[in-house]
């Protein structure tokens, strides 16, 4: 069944904490792992703004073992409190086990195993990610080896199946539970859908009914109404949100407030958003260094500003600059001018957000504004 976008009235959801063998997720609305997006600065910011748990970018197990410097930077965990998960991908049980041990040594509270990545390089070239949904024996070996290797809880993220002829997520979830996996997240698409079509939240209920461990619903949750519908239709214990947080790291807090109260939090004032953008930008510079930080920040600045008056020219100027302080000056001038003119930000249109990344890439979408 597809998802229809409609406004619904729901009673408040309790959203009780999830306790995974002593690792407690107080608020089970989680920032999804997103390649090139959920680096440490973004995860730290999202958690400060209300995310109940954050998950690293997907990390290849072999790169972790070889201590590739870029991989180690991706695997860095924040010691500032809260629950942080590191996501691993791979097709060799021994490598996954060793990488998990290294991740725990670096401070990961949880290890998440990726059986959902649809990218050809991973799923076909490396027989990892979503390809493992087609080989349940190999999948079980990886799950069991990883669970046995570490003392922290291990979780799993997967899709409904490889295609609609093999929707085996409920069966694989039972296998995972038997292997000691403590929580399962299901993206309501098949591998063959990539990020196209619509996420099937109703199917996730079949996974929930198949296991006793917590189940998290993921896919197409970009408005508060989506969050309520996904939770109600899936029967899941919590939600994982990805694209809805592009340029809106405060969105998870809005979702949590709506689910618990039925009331909507407005978008932050533009002056507050300027502070978030500036904080995020400086954090990227500090973490990655000036040269890399400037380049990595461009997509985030684009998401933050898209749809605001003059944003096309602003983004073009930002993308031309290599000097970090010059970019910060542009950000300050751009937002201050809009604040002075009384511009406020409205929530993005659902169709625009869903268009972002429909091809698996993180591309900005339009955001409405009002004066």
Image (cartoon, helix red, strand yellow):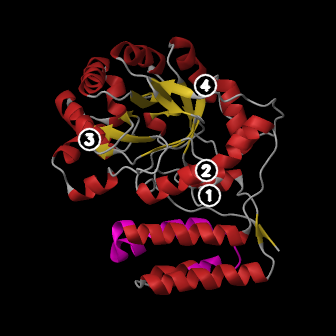
Image height check: is 210 above or below 9?
above
Q: What is the spatial separation of the Cα atoms under label 3 and label 4, in whole angstroms?
A: 31 Å
Query: Along the polypeptide, which appears first: circle 3 or circle 4?
Result: 3
- Kindly check if marks 4 and 1 are in contact, taking CB atoms under 8 A apart as contact: no
Q: Position of residue 47 (x, y in %)?
A: 54, 50
From this view, report whether residue 10 is shown above or below residue 135. below
Q: Secondary structure at mark 1?
A: loop
**Are dots 3 and 4 in contact, CB under 8 Å?**
no
Mark 2 / mark 4, whichever is N-terminal: 4
Does the magenta segment cover residue 3? no
Which structural element holds mark 3?
helix
> Which image quadrant for residue 99?
top left
Task: Give the labeled residue for mark 4.
Answer: 236
Q: Residue at x 55, y 86 (%)?
A: 329
Residue at which label 3 appears: 105
Residue 40 visible (yes or no): yes
Residue 305 visible? The answer is no
**In contact (CB < 8 Å): disc 1 and disc 2:** yes
Q: Position of residue 195 (x, y in %)?
A: 51, 44
Q: Single out the mark in the foreground, 3 or 4.
A: 3
Range drawn in magenta: 287-314
Q: Do the numbered discs 3 and 2 sit on residues whose CB atoms are within 8 Å?
A: no
267, above or below 11, in the image:
below
């Amino acid at each position: 069944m597809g998802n229809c976008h409609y406004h619904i009235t729901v009673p408040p959801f309790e959203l009780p904490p999830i306790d995974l063998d002593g690792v407690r997720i107080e608020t089970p609305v989680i920032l999804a792992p997103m390649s090139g997006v959920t680096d440490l600065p973004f995860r730290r910011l999202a958690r400060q703004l209300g995310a109940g748990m954050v998950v690293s970018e997907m990390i290849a197990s072999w790169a972790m073992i070889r201590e590739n410097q870029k991989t180690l930077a991706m695997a860095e965990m924040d010691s500032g409190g809260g629950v942080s998960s590191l996501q691993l991908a791979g097709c060799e049980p021994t490598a996954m086990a060793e990488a998990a041990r290294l991740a725990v040594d670096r401070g990961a509270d949880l290890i998440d195993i990726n059986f959902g990545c649809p990218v050809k390089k991973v799923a076909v070239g490396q027989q990892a990610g979503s390809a493992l949904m087609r080989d349940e024996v190999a999948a079980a070996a990886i799950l069991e080896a990883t669970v046995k290797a570490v003392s922290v809880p291990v979780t799993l993220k997967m899709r409904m199946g490889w295609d609609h002829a093999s929707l085996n997520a409920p069966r694989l979830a039972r296998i995972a539970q038997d292997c000691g996996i403590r929580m399962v997240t299901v993206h309501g698409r098949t591998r063959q859908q990539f990020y196209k079509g619509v996420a099937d939240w109703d199917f996730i209920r079949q996974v929930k009914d198949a296991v006793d461990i917590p189940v998290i619903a993921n896919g197409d949750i970009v408005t508060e109404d989506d969050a309520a519908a996904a939770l109600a239709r899936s029967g899941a214990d919590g939600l994982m949100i990805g694209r809805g947080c592009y340029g809106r790291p405060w969105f998870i807090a809005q979702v949590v407030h709506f689910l618990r109260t039925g009331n909507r939090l407005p978008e932050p004032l533009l002056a507050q958003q300027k502070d978030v953008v500036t904080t995020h930008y400086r954090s990227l510079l500090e973490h990655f260094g000036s040269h890399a930080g400037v380049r990595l920040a461009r997509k985030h600045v684009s998401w933050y500003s898209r749809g605001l008056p003059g944003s096309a020219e602003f983004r073009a100027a930002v993308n031309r600059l290599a000097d970090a302080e010059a970019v910060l000056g542009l950000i300050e001038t751009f937002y201050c001018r809009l604040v002075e003119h009384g511009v406020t930000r409205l929530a993005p249109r659902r169709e625009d957000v869903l268009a972002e990344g429909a091809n698996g890439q993180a591309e900005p979408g339009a955001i409405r504004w009002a004066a």
